[in-house]
Image (cartoon, rainbow, N blue to C red):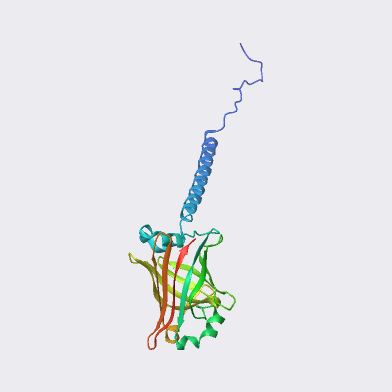
């Protein structure tokens, strides 16, 4: 049938989007899902890595064969409020040279400026929710005096390389190595930690070189020893004892 003059018939309108617009939307959806999956995977990896003990990365493959009491003693995880408590007794001895340094030890919060045998001692190993560092809080209960508290902070530089930082940034740097029997702390020098930098200081000439080890006694106990030996005057400091992980 002929149409009326001046009236043009057109195809009915549809709601289908243009193919190009549809493809762009699909790409946007896929891109958002990909970003979300990447974020979730990153978070999962971060949580899995940081659910492992701090010392697992420091000791590396040796962690798997570490004796039970040492694994318990090093059990703290980063970014947590983990606390491991050990109780025991300690013997602390000084040479004449280091006795003259007692006021400096007390001032700088480095080492214990007291001597004694069979000193009841409690150590709290702590981690904090805002970092990956490992904290020591040592309580020495000497007779006839208030408990002496010695605190320090262990920072992992890289691999087995760590720095124990004390008051005013005075630091001892060492490697943590398990030799199949003992965890050994191998001396790498003394430093002053300031503004995130490690500046070497020649304390070996004044105090001597540090050496330390820890070994298991049974499934719940371990013994440890720290000595400092001067190149000229011999052993200047000894700090040893045994502990039970509670």
Q: Which one is nearer the viewer's eye here, 134 or 21? A: 134
Is residue 136 toward the left or the right of residue 182 in the image?
A: right
- Which sits in the foreground, 104 or 88? 88
Judge from the rendering whether residue 141 lies leftward or rightward of residue 6; answer left or right.
Answer: left
Residue 65 drawn above or below residue 88: above
**Residue 202 visible in the picture:** no
- Which percent across, then down, holds residue 146? 59, 76
Residue placed furthest toward the top: 1
**Residue 239 left/right relative to 13:** left
Q: Which residue is located at x 55 percent, y 85 percent?
A: 103
Task: Give the number of marks.
Answer: 0
Which x, y percent locates residue 84?
51, 61
**Residue 85 in view in this figure:** yes
When asked about the image quadrant of residue 65, the answer is bottom left
Up-down: is 75 above or below 140?
above
State the residue in front, 161 or 122.
122
Q: Quadrant of the N terminus?
A: top right
Q: Position of residue 32 (x, y in %)?
A: 53, 44
Q: Is residue 132 above or below residue 96?
A: above
Q: Residue 40 location, x and y as percent?
A: 51, 47
């Amino acid at each position: 049938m002929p149409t009326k003059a001046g009236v043009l018939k057109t195809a009915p309108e549809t709601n289908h989007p243009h193919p190009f617009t549809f493809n762009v939307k699909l790409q946007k959806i896929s891109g958002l899902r990909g970003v979300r999956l990447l974020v979730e995977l990153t978070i999962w990896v971060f949580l899995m890595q940081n659910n492992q003990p701090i010392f697992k990365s420091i000791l590396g493959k040796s962690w798997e064969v570490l004796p039970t009491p040492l694994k318990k003693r090093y059990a703290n995880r980063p970014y947590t409020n983990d606390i491991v408590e050990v109780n025991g007794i300690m013997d602390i001895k000084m040479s004449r040279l280091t006795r003259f340094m007692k006021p400096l030890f007390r001032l700088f919060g480095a080492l214990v400026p007291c001597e004694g045998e069979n000193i009841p001692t409690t150590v709290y190993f702590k981690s904090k929710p805002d970092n990956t560092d490992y904290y020591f809080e040592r309580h020495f209960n000497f007779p006839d005096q208030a408990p002496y508290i010695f605190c320090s902070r262990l920072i992992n530089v890289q691999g087995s390389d760590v720095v124990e930082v004390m008051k005013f940034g005075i630091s001892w740097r060492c490697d943590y190595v398990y030799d199949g029997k003992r965890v050994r702390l191998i001396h790498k020098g003394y430093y002053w930690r300031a503004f995130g930098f490690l500046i070497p200081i020649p304390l070996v000439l004044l105090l001597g070189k540090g050496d330390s080890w820890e070994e298991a006694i049974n499934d719940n106990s371990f013994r440890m020893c720290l000595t400092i030996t001067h190149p000229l005057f011999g052993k200047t400091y000894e700090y040893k004892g045994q502990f039970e992980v509670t």
